[in-house]
Every structure is written in structure tokens, then in C-alpha cells.
Image (tube, coloured by chain):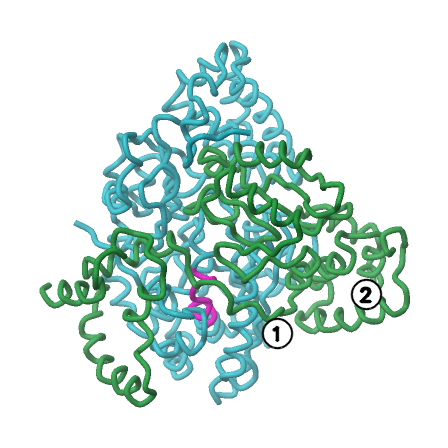
Amino acid sequence: MSTLAPVLSDLWDAPQSWKLDTYVSRNGYDGLRKAMETDPAELITMVKDSGLRGRGGAGFPTGLKWSFLPKPDGGPRYLVVNADESEPGTCKDIPLMMANPHSLIEGVAITSVAIGCHHAFIYLRGEVVHVYRRLLAAVREAKEAGYLGSDVLGTGYDLEVTVHAGAGAYICGEETALLDSLEGRRGQPRLKPPFPAVAGLYARPTVVNNVESIASVPGIVSRGADWFASMGTEKSKGHGLFSLSGHVARPGQYEAPLGITFRELLDMAGGVRDGHELKFWTPGGSSTPILTAEHLDVVLDYESVGAAGSMLATRALQVFDETTSVVRCVSRWIDFYQHESCGKCTPCREGTFWLKQILQRLEAGEGSESDIDLLLDVAGNIEGRSFCALGDAAATPVKSAIKYFRDEFEQGLHTPAWELFPYEANAAFTGVSS
Amino acid sequence: MATSMTSYPDDVAERLAQDAQQILARYPEPRSALLPLLHLVQSEDGYVSPAGIGFCADVLDLSRASVSAVATFYSQYKRHPNGTYTVGVCTNTLCAVMGGDAIFDHLAAKLGIGHDETTEDGTITLERVECNAACDYAPVMVINWEFFDNQTPTTAAETVDKLLAGEPVAPSRGADRVSTFKEVSRVLAGFEDGHADEGPGAGHASLVGLELARKNGWRIPGEEEAGEAAGPQVAADAAASGTDPVGDEGSSAEREPRTPGDADADPVKSTDEEGTDS
């Protein structure tokens, strides 16, 4: 049986958990002290050896990403933290930064030293003002205490950290769109290669990492790569925040070693809400193919979720019970992708526009015979043909939902989803009266 | 009113120019300042005004068209005067299913406005918002980008009534009271407002896993040895400073009881006991 492993979340219930004093009283910034006495190449090796893989969704090995930076040429090298958490269902980085911003700041400092960066950026989505306050305050506190700024811990190392607020655009979670946005432009993705490691922010070598990835670095440095690698499975090491939401008894954050099963997490969360049963769920946000009750025992690591036909991604486990219309859910997700499509490439811009219209008539019970095949056709013409992963993501819920619940889409030819699945029955409250 | 002008009066322009210099100083390249400058403009005018576009263009030596092209890309930049409070109801899938659609419909009917519309008195702009990374608190409402968790049509309407009456409202996880749209825009431009230490570190849903681990005595690898090593030092520090160590003891006691675990007379003690047994 798996148990939870609160590493990053361990401090969250402390009084004034976000303050520097609180963090330091729990051995905070010990990792940075150690890092300042360590050869930068050795730091990269430690993170490689730990097996840490990117926690923002793609799961790319973090240490390997760092090692892709070209040799120093005397010019600037940048670290940019992707704090644009916007994937529907994903809600781990925001509580992390609200409760314990210093775990991220320490990770930023260590990573900067490792890659030779003297000016790091945290790109936070703009719609979370209190988290921005906490980050601004944390950087100020860390600077005043000598953990950031000029002459870090008396070592002569200079490190500026700028916390930057976005302005509402899901696409800025895509790393090259994020860089364009940080450069003061519309957030549209760039053609790769060149990858950010070679030509990123201001066309300089840049590492872009997720909040949770960077916040995991201090633990690896202070406790050791072996300690981190002692958690998890063969190729998916360490701890991760699993976010359960929707029709579960106790939604929330559950930090566990990778490789815990969905059934175990669901049990810990008190199961599906009283009197109901599981219908479908996402393993890692709306961009990952949905799974069903037959996948309860899927091991939540990158390989196993992949083998089950989905992706671990951000471990955003959205749970829907039998009262929920899958057509309604997919229709709303597609509204989102259509709204957030940046417009740069035709398959995504036009494809999401058409998907949205087809799904809205299926939800209203006004679909036509050919609509389901048309959905699959449009989705198939977006997937693999769009400029960035947003297009693929839009195709994903459509294809996976039709795969498991085609009959429900067929009912959309004659009966509205709200008659098949009365929407009042879904809500967390009863007795809605407008 | 600045709203009808295409440039600011001298005193306003001078004040904003000083703020702009502070913003520019944060970046190696000036153009990176554009997003915060647009937030700054909204803190002055309550939307991205023609004067504001001109100001950003002049500061960064860009064309007005270039600035407009950026401003229109992002949903937080308003193209017409915004209400004092943006009331956003998450209607992305999970929140919608959990009741967000019903909440939005209820507020729209109550206020007589739809998405991106503002009440006649200029108090409230109603919005459907996309996922705001608080799914474990669904359904969620955000007012000027502060979290109102686990809403119902009734609680949302009560909060809106307070706003209409000019009374302060307090978010679930955020500052003691919600600031105005202009005030919040200034924070988003990167200027601290002194409210960072208000509100909780974490809400109840953020802590459910941690509480379960404490209750069951689940430890991370190496924690017991590390705990023993750190124990005497922490205790000595506590004795020296005359305070309890920051940590387990204070945490649950500071919270309102919310979960079954809270009902336990001494959850910390039982955690320790289970930890010792294992």
C-alpha cells in the first residue's frame, strides 16, 4: 500500500508558513548554502541522478534539460519559472506558492547557480493577486537576508529575481509563448528548434521549468539524489502533488510518491461523493485523455498512465460521477480551447471553432447524423498538425470521450444533455433557485 | 476625465513616468515592461485607455498599434471602463459541473447583466472566467482576482449584495478585504500594497493530504532520523526564544475545525504515538 509523502506541502499548516523566518526554522535555505559550496556541474549531476522529471506536464528530465545549455560565452543565461498554471483541473502550484513561496525562491537560487544565471524570472499568471503579493514579499525578504541580490551569502555571486505577472492567456503556459509574453509581446508560440536552451529569452540560453520542479530542487540538494530517487517507480522518481477535484468526498492536495494508484488516492479522498459512483476522470488535466472506472488501478507514473492510453501530465485528477454528461464536459472544454487558441496556426484556430459548434448542437440534442464522425475528422486534422500542443490538447477530450461514451454523443442527435443528465444533480449544493 | 483623452495631463504623466522607470529597472530589455505597464495604466484609468496606450508607446518607443496588438491579446486588459469590482465566476468544466453555471446564471439574473457587462452604478463587472487553479475548492468565484471558495448561488449573491452596498468583502484565501480593480491593477504592475501577510497560508482543501499523513504517522524517507537530529536543536531554539517551535503544535490549533481529524481531542499527540509505534 502506498502512503502520502508530504515534502513540499509539509510546511503548509505552519502559522505564517509563507514567511522567511518560518521557512528558515525548518532548515530552509540549507540547500542553497550547500549549493554555494558545490561545483555547478555537480549540482546538475545531482538533479540528473535524482530522476526528477518536469512537473509541468511533459515529464522531461530536469537535469538533462539544464545540461542542454551551451557552454558559457560570457553573455547572460536565464532561468524562467513557468508559474502560469492554467490547465483546467490543475491547482497545485498556486497553493504551493501561496503557502510556501520560499521553497520556490530557494529552488530558483540553486538552479541559477547550477546553470550560471544571474537574472531569473518567475512568470506568474495574472489572475492570482494574493499569490503575486506573497512572491513579491518573499523575494524582498530573501534579498534582505542575503539569499538573493548582490553577493549571495557572501560568495560574490549576484542574482536578481523578477516576479512578473501575466495578464490572462492560457497559451502562455507553453514555454515559448511564455517567453514571447515575457518579452512584451502577444503570447504566441515559437517554432522549435531552436529550443529555449539555445535561444530562449532575448534569444539567449534559457531554462524554463515548472514551479513544482524548481521547488523540488532544494530537497534534492540538501537530502541527496538517492533520497529523492528512493521514492517513486523505476522511471518516475520522487514526490508529486496530486490534486483531486470534483465529485470526491474530500477534494484537495495529496502529495505522494509517483506510482501511487488512482484507487489509493480516491480512497484517501473519501471516495466518490456519497451515494454515487465514478464515471470518468482525467489523470492530468483536460488535455489528457479521459479514463473510466476500469482504470482505477492504474499506477500513476508516466509510463503506466501512458500505457493506459493517457498521460500523467500535471496529476490533476478531476473526478466526475454518474450524474455528469460527458458531452457537456467535452463541449465546455472545447469552449475553453477555442477561447484560448492564440490564432497563430490554422488547424487550431479554425478547428476549435468548428469543434465548438458541433459540440454545442450535440449538447442541445440537435446534432445531425454525421456529427460524430465530423468531430473525429476535425479532431484528427488538428492533432499533429498544429503549431503547439494546445491544438493536440483540444483534440484529446473529443477523441477519448467518443471512444468510451459514443452512445452518449449519439443521444445528442435527439435529446439535450440536460434532459439526459439534469445539471442540478451535478452541483456541490442543492436547491438552486434563480 | 482621462477616459476621453489621448494623452495624460502633465502631473499624471509625470507620476506614471516615475512608476514606469521602476518597472523598466526590473528587466534587461525595456519591452519586457509592457505587460506591467498595461497593468499600471489600468490602475490609473480602470481600463486600457487611449491615453494609456499612448503612454506605453511613448515610454517604450513603440507604435500605438504595437501596444494595442498586445493589449487586445490578454483577457485581463479591459477595452472599456471596468467596474470597481470584477466578479468572475469560473465556468470552465469542473466548476461549471459543480455549480458554477448555476452561480453565474443566478448573478446575471440578479444584476441584470451578462458576461463582460457592468452594472449601471459602475460597481460590478460580471465575467465568466476560465480555470483559476482552485479546482479543489469548486465552485469558485474570484473578485478582483481574490479567491472565494466553495460558493453557492446564495453565498455568491450575498457577497455581491455587500459590494453593491459599498461594504468590504473578505476572500477565503487572500487579503483581509478585496481591493478595488485599480488598486489590484497596481499590484499586478509589481508594486507591493502591504497585504501579503493577510489571510491564511493554505485553505482547508490544500491541507487534506497533509492532515491525513499526520494523522496516520506517514513519514517521508529519512524523516525519522532527520527528526531526531533536528529535534534537540529545535527544542533548544524554542527554549532560548521562549516560544514553541514553529510546526505541528501550532498548526491545527490555529484553524477552525473543518475536518473529522479536527474533532480529535489531540491530533498531534495521536500522530506522535502512531509515529512511535511504527
Can residue A190 be seen here? The reply is: no
- Is residue A158 toward the left or the right of residue B40 in the image? left
Q: Secondary structure at mark 2?
A: helix
The quadrant holding residue A283 is: top left
Residue type, label 1 = Gly
User: Image point 68% across, 61% down: which residue?
Assistant: B183
CA distance for labels 2 and 1: 26 Å
- Is residue A261 toward the left or the right of residue B156 in the image? left
Residue B36, image x, y percentages: 69, 61
Instruction: Indicate the quadrant containing the C terminus of chain A: top left, top right, bottom left or bottom right.
Output: top right
The local crowd at label 2, few if under 14, some if 14 to 19, many if 20 or more residues have their Cα within 10 Å, is: some
State which chain disc 1 sits on: A
Nearer to us in this view, A83 or A110: A83
Residue B110, image x, y percentages: 63, 35
Q: Which chain does the cyan colour mark?
A: A
Q: Secondary structure at mark 1?
A: loop
The local crowd at label 1, few if under 14, some if 14 to 19, many if 20 or more residues have their Cα within 10 Å, is: few
Residue occupied by mark 2? B59
Residue type, label 2 = Val
Residue occupied by mark 1? A75
Instruction: Give the main secondary structure, helix, strand or loop, of the magenta stretch.
Output: helix
Nearer to us in this view, A201 or B236: B236
User: Image point 56% across, 18% down: which residue?
Assistant: A361
Q: Which of pointers 2 and 1 indicates the residue nearer the eye? A: 2
User: Image point 26% across, 36% down: which residue?
Assistant: A296
Q: Are marks 2 and 1 in contact (CB under 8 Å)?
A: no
Q: Is residue B98 above or below residue B159?
A: above
The range drawn in magenta is A96-105
Residue B139, image x, y percentages: 47, 41
Rendered shade, chain B? green
Q: Is residue B149 above or below residue A433?
A: below
Residue A392, image x, y percentages: 51, 36
